[in-house]
Image (spheres, rainbow, N blue to C red):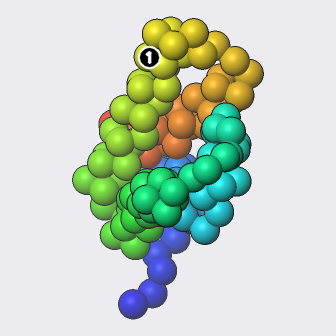
């Protein structure tokens, strides 16, 4: 099995969104304490179950990104884009409901929107 790299720019953008998701997932999976600090959590007494939850979330991001890269099909890019868009929507709701309008939240929201828009733009024909 060989890794397919797209030749056209629109699909390359979708591929980039999948790669960003996979890299973020790998970071969360391998370095959960750093990921928690980056997300704004104060690391105190985190139980093994807590780290397990964080690592499993990283595995989800990693799995979605990797499967979109390996299969390179519209449906996998669509699934990745919709999942990232729902994550961005959740962060947006938190920014309003939890008074979380901070630079860190805004930056992470922007990253989530980019990861969502790149594959969705390709699948829906905007690129």
**Is residue 126 in view from this perspective?**
no
Mark 1 crowdedness (10 Å alpha carbons): few <14, some 14-19, many ≥20: few
Q: Looking at the picture, how far across and down is residue 127, in whole percent?
A: 48, 38
Residue placed furthest toward the front: 45
- Report helix, strand or loop for mark 1: helix
- The answer to whether residue 84 of the structure is visible from this angle is yes
Q: Position of residue 72 (x, y in %)?
A: 37, 64
Above/below status of 52 relative to 112: below
What residue lies at 64% left-to-right and 13% top-to-bottom? 101
Q: Residue at x 42, y 26 (%)?
A: 90
Residue 5 falls left or right of residue 37: left
In x, y percent, where is residue 19? 55, 60
Q: Position of residue 64 (x, y in %)?
A: 38, 59
Answer with the quarter of the image where residue 59 lies. bottom left
Image quarter of residue 81: top left
* Residue at which label 1 appears: 93
Q: Quadrant of residue 86?
A: top left
- Would residue 83 appear left or right of 8 to someone viewing this image? left
Nearest the eye: 54 or 24: 54
Q: Residue furthest right?
A: 103
Q: Farthest left residue?
A: 75
Is residue 70 left or right of 17 when viewed as pictured?
left
- Left or right relative to 1: residue 16: right
Image point (31%, 46%), residue name: 78
Q: How many marks?
A: 1
- Residue at (58% x, 29% y) in the render: 109
Quadrant into which the N terminus falls? bottom left
Above/below status of 40 relative to 47: above
Nearer to us in this view, 5 or 65: 65
């Amino acid at each position: 099995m060989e890794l397919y790299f797209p030749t056209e720019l629109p699909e390359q953008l979708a591929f980039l969104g999948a790669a960003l998701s996979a890299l973020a997932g790998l970071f969360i999976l391998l370095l959960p304490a750093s990921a928690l600090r980056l997300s704004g959590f104060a690391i105190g007494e985190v139980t093994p179950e807590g780290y397990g939850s964080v690592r499993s979330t990283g595995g989800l991001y990693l799995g979605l990104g990797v499967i979109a890269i390996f299969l390179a099909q519209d449906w996998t890019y669509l699934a990745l884009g919709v999942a990232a868009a729902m994550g961005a929507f959740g962060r947006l709701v938190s920014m309003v409901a939890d008074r979380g309008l901070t630079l860190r939240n805004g930056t992470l929201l922007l990253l989530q929107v980019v990861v969502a828009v790149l594959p969705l733009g390709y699948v829906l024909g905007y690129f």
